[in-house]
Image (spheres, rainbow, N blue to C red):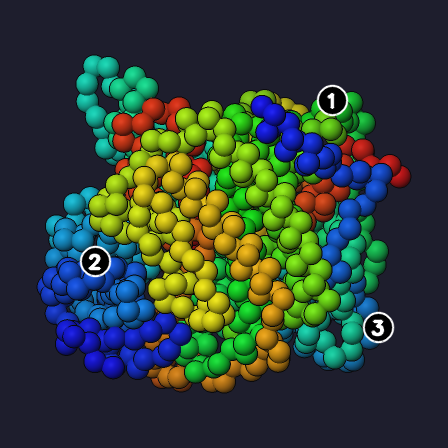
C-alpha cells in the first residue's frame, strides 16, 4: 500500500508490517508531518518512544477514521541530550504523549506548552528528565508547583490522592473564585505499576494477564487489543466463533460499565432510586461475563488465537433469556431516570465541551461522541465480529454531562439488541487455534473500542520473532485533559458529577 | 413521582438472603483450588513452569500459594495428572500469610477477632479503603458490597470517607512507589485499635505486577495484616465471607 504522502506507511490494525518499511523522517519534520496528516483528515492515535541500542525512536500513528486506515512513521533521536520540535505546539492532542516520552527517555520536545511529568517515575536508564531526577526518598508525586491563579478572593482546593469513596488515587487541584472553578489541574501517576515492561514477559500467560489488568474494568477491551496486535504479528486468523465470543464479552463489559456509570451519576445528584437499581443491574451484567469464563471481569477469557471458553448452545440460550429480562429492567429504569426534571436539570449544561475542544484535545469514546464526533473503532476500523454485525454509533451534540449520559443510554440499548441477536446466531467452529511463530522485526497494531473509547496496543518483535516491546494506550490518556477543561467555569460542587460523567481510568493512564 | 413508584414496584426486593442462603455462583466459577500431591510423578514441574505468578513450587512437593495465585487456568491445563483442580468454594480468606500456602492440607480459614477487639468492633466496623496500585477490579468488587444486592451495612460494616472515622484499613493494589507514602499517612491517621485487611493478589504479594521495580509486592512488611482475602480479583462473596469471619458474624 502506498500513502498519499511519502513520509507515511499506510496500514490497518491487525496486520504486521516490517519495521524497516516504516518511513523514518527527520526529527524536525515530525510535528509538521503530523500537522499535515491532521489536515488530510487524520487523528493522532499513538505517539510513543522506544529505546533501540541507545537511541530513542519515536513512532507516530495516525488514524484515518473515514477510510478505516492507519498511517505510521518514525524518527530517531541520538542517545544523549536529545530534543526535537514539539508536536503539541501544533497538535494539542499530543500533550500527554510527549510528556510520556520525555519522562521515559529524557527527550525534550522543544516548544511544548506545558512540559511536566505524566506519571512521576525516573527515566528508564537513569538519565535526567527535563525536570531533573526525582528523589526516591521523597513522596512523589506531591512536591509539585501547581499552576496558580492569583487574587485576593481566589482560593485553592486540594483533593486526593486518597479520596472519600472506594476509588483509585489521583490528585485534583482546583483554583476557585467562590464556587466557580477557574482552573483544575490533575496530577496522576499514583497507580503506576510498570505494566508495559511486564507485557513483554517470558511467560505468555503472565503477559496476557498483565494486559487484562492494565485497567481491570476494561479487561476484555485491553485483552482484545493486545491479542489482535499479537495475532497480526503471527498472521493468525481468529476463528469466527471466537471473534463472536469476544464481541459478546466486549459488549457485556460495555453494558456493565455504562449501567454502573449511569447509576453513579444518579448517586452524585442524590437521585437514589436509579442509583440503587442501576448499581444492582451492573452486577447482573458482570455475572453474565462470570457465566462465560468464571470471572466477573472476563479474566482468562481472551488469549492470542481465540478464547479459552466457548459459549455452548444451551448457555447462549440462557444468556439470551437473562439479557432479555435485564433489558426490560434496565431500560425501564433509564426511561424513568431520563424523564425526571430534577435529573435533567443537574445534567444539562453542566461541564460542557465544544466539538472544537474535543477535536483539539483528541477525545475518544463516549466523551467524544457526546460532543458530536462520531468516532468509534467498531465502526471506523471494524474487526472481528464487527465486520459482519453493525453497531450504530451513538452521537449527541451538547458535550455536557447530559450528552455523556445520553450517549451511554443509547449505547446500552444498542449493545443489548446486538447481544441478543448475536447470541442467537453464534457461528459454528472452534474457538481457539494455535498462534504460529511471530513475524520477526515487525510491528503489529491492535485496536478496540472499549467502553471508555479507543484502545491501541502496538507490539514489536526482534529478529528472532520474540516480542521485544509493547506500547499500550488506554483511552483515558486522551480524555483526562478533557475533564480538566470541562470543569472551567463550573461550580466545584459539580466536580463529582463531571468526573463521573467521564469516569476515566487512573490505572489505565498510569500503566 | 408515580413513574418512580412503578419502577420501584417492578424492581422488587433484591437483597440476597446470604448468609442464610448461598447465592448461586456460575458453573465455571473458579474458587478454592485443591491440590493432590500424591498424583505428581517424580520430578514433574509442568505446573510450576506454566504458572504465570510463581504461585506453585514443587521442590518440597507440590505447593500452591493462594496469596500469589491469579486463578487463571494455566496449571490445570498444564497438569496431565489432574493434581490441581478448582472447586466452586468461595471461602478463601485467612488470618495469616502462611495459612494461604496449600500443601495438601485443608485451608485454615480466617478466625474471628480476639474478644477484646470484638467487643469494640464486632457489631460496628468502619473501614477506610486505600487503593495503592490495583487495576481497580478489587476496588469495584469491594464497592459492590454496598449495592442493594449485598447491602453490607446490615452486618454493621460500613466504608467511611475519613481514616479518622475508621477502625480498619482495606488495602488493594501492589503498593506503588507513588502511593507508599499516602498509604502510611492514612494508616497513621486512624485511631487505635486498628486492623488491616489486604484484598486481592496485588495487596498480598504484588499479583500480576509482582517484582515490577515500581511496586512493593503488596502490603507485607509495610503494615501488619489481620485478614488476607486472595483472588484476582476475589468475588464479592469471598470478600464478604472474610469480613464476616473477622467479626464472627457467620453462623457456624
* C-alpha distance separating marks 3 and 2: 57 Å
**Residue matched to label 2:** A107
Same chain for the residues under marks 3 and 1 in the image:
yes
Residue at horizontal 53 percent and vertical 60 percent from the top: A418
Tell me, for residue B38, which label it has, or none: 3
Q: In this view, does A468 lie to the left or right of A260?
A: left
Q: Position of residue A32 (x, y in %)?
A: 12, 62
Letter of the chain that mark 1 sits on in the rendering: B
Tell me, for residue B120, which label it has, or none: 1
* Residue B237, placed above or below residue B246: below
* Residue A299, placed above or below residue A262: below
* C-alpha distance separating marks 1 and 2: 56 Å
Neighbourhood count class around disc 1 (C-alpha, 10 Å): few under 14, some 14–19, many 20 upward: few
First of labels 3, 1 by sequence position: 3
Q: Where is residue B123 in the image (x, y as percent from the top left)?
A: 76, 24
Picture quarter containing residue B139?
Answer: top right
* Residue A382, placed above or below residue A488: below
Q: Position of residue A257 (x, y in %)?
A: 52, 47
Tell me, for residue A289, which label it has, or none: none
Letter of the chain that mark 3 sits on in the rendering: B
Amino acid at each position: 500500500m502506498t500513502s498519499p504522502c511519502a513520509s507515511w506507511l499506510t496500514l490497518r490494525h491487525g496486520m504486521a508490517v516490517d519495521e524497516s518499511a516504516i518511513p523514518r523522517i527527520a526529527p524536525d519534520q515530525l510535528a509538521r508531518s503530523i500537522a499535515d496528516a491532521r489536515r488530510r483528515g487524520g487523528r493522532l492515535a499513538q505517539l510513543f518512544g522506544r529505546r533501540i541500542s541507545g537511541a530513542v525512536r519515536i513512532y507516530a500513528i495516525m488514524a484515518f477514521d473515514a477510510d478505516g486506515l492507519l498511517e505510521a512513521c518514525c524518527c530517531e533521536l541520538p542517545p544523549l541530550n536529545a530534543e526535537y520540535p514539539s508536536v503539541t505546539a501544533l497538535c494539542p492532542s499530543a500533550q500527554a504523549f510527549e510528556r510520556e516520552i520525555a519522562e521515559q527517555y529524557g527527550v525534550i520536545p522543544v516548544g511544548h506548552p506545558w512540559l511536566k511529568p505524566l506519571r512521576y517515575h525516573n527515566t528508564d536508564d537513569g538519565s535526567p528528565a527535563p525536570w531533573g531526577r526525582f528523589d526516591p526518598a521523597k513522596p512523589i508525586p506531591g512536591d509539585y508547583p501547581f499552576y496558580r491563579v492569583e487574587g485576593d478572593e481566589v482560593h485553592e482546593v486540594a483533593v486526593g490522592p486518597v479520596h472519600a469513596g472506594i476509588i483509585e488515587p489521583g490528585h485534583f487541584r482546583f483554583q476557585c473564585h467562590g464556587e466557580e472553578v477557574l482552573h483544575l489541574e490533575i496530577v496522576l501517576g499514583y497507580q503506576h505499576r510498570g505494566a508495559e515492561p511486564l507485557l513483554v514477559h517470558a511467560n505468555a500467560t503472565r503477559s496476557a494477564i498483565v494486559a487484562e489488568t492494565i485497567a481491570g474494568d476494561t479487561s476484555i477491551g485491553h485483552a482484545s487489543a493486545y491479542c489482535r496486535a499479537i495475532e497480526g504479528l503471527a498472521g493468525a486468523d481468529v476463528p469466527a466463533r471466537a471473534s463472536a465470543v469476544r464481541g459478546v464479552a466486549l459488549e457485556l463489559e460495555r453494558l456493565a460499565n455504562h449501567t454502573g456509570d449511569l447509576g453513579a451519576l444518579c448517586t452524585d445528584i442524590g437521585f437514589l432510586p436509579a442509583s440503587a437499581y442501576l448499581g444492582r443491574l451492573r452486577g447482573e451484567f458482570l455475572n453474565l461475563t462470570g457465566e462465560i469464563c468464571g470471572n466477573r471481569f472476563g479474566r482468562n477469557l481472551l488469549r492470542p488465537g481465540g478464547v479459552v471458553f466457548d459459549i455452548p448452545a444451551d448457555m447462549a440460550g440462557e444468556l439470551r433469556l437473562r439479557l432479555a429480562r435485564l433489558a426490560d429492567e434496565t431500560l425501564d429504569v433509564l426511561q424513568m431516570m431520563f424523564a425526571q426534571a430534577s435529573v435533567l436539570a443537574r445534567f444539562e449544561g453542566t461541564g460542557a465541551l465544544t466539538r472544537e475542544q474535543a477535536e483539539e484535545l483528541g477525545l475518544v469514546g463516549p466523551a467524544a461522541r457526546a460532543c458530536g464526533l462520531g468516532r468509534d473503532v467498531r465502526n471506523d476500523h471494524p474487526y472481528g465480529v464487527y465486520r459482519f454485525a453493525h453497531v450504530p454509533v451513538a452521537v449527541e451534540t451538547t458535550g455536557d454531562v447530559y450528552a455523556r449520559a445520553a450517549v451511554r443510554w443509547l449505547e446500552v440499548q444498542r449493545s443489548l439488541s446486538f447481544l441478543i441477536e448475536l447470541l442467537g446466531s453464534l457461528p459454528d467452529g472452534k474457538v481457539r487455534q494455535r498462534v504460529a511463530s511471530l513475524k520477526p522485526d515487525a510491528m503489529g497494531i491492535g485496536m478496540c473500542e472499549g467502553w471508555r473509547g479507543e484502545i491501541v496496543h502496538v507490539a514489536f518483535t526482534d529478529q528472532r520473532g520474540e516480542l521485544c516491546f509493547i506500547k499500550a494506550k488506554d483511552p483515558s490518556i486522551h480524555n483526562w485533559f478533557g475533564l480538566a477543561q470541562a470543569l472551567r467555569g463550573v461550580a466545584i460542587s459539580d466536580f463529582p458529577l463531571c468526573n463521573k460523567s467521564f469516569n476515566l481510568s487512573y490505572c489505565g493512564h498510569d500503566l | 413521582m408515580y413513574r418512580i413508584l412503578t419502577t420501584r414496584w417492578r424492581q422488587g426486593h433484591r437483597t440476597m438472603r446470604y448468609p442464610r442462603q448461598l447465592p448461586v455462583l456460575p458453573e465455571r466459577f473458579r474458587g478454592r483450588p485443591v491440590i493432590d500431591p500424591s498424583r505428581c510423578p517424580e520430578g514433574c514441574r509442568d505446573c510450576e513452569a506454566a504458572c504465570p505468578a510463581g504461585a506453585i513450587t514443587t521442590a518440597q512437593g507440590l505447593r500452591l500459594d493462594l496469596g500469589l495465585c491469579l486463578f487463571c487456568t494455566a496449571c490445570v491445563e498444564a497438569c496431565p495428572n489432574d493434581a490441581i483442580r478448582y472447586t466452586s468454594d468461595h471461602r478463601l480468606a485467612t488470618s495469616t500469610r502462611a495459612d494461604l500456602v496449600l500443601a495438601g492440607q485443608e485451608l485454615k480459614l480466617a478466625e474471628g477477632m480476639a474478644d477484646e477487639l470484638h467487643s469494640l468492633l464486632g457489631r460496628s466496623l468502619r473501614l477506610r479503603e486505600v487503593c495503592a496500585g490495583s487495576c481497580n477490579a478489587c476496588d469495584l468488587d469491594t464497592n459492590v458490597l454496598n449495592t442493594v444486592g449485598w447491602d453490607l451495612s446490615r452486618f454493621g460494616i460500613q466504608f467511611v470517607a475519613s481514616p479518622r472515622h475508621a477502625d480498619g484499613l482495606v488495602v488493594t493494589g501492589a503498593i506503588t512507589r507513588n502511593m507508599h507514602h499516602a498509604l502510611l499517612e492514612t494508616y497513621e491517621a486512624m485511631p487505635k485499635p486498628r486492623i488491616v485487611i489486604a484484598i486481592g493478589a496485588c495487596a498480598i504479594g504484588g499479583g500480576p505486577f509482582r517484582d515490577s521495580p515500581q511496586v512493593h509486592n503488596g502490603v507485607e512488611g509495610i503494615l501488619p495484616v489481620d485478614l488476607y482475602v486472595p483472588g484476582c480479583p476475589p468475588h464479592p462473596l469471598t470478600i464478604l465471607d472474610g469480613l464476616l469471619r473477622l467479626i464472627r458474624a457467620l453462623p457456624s
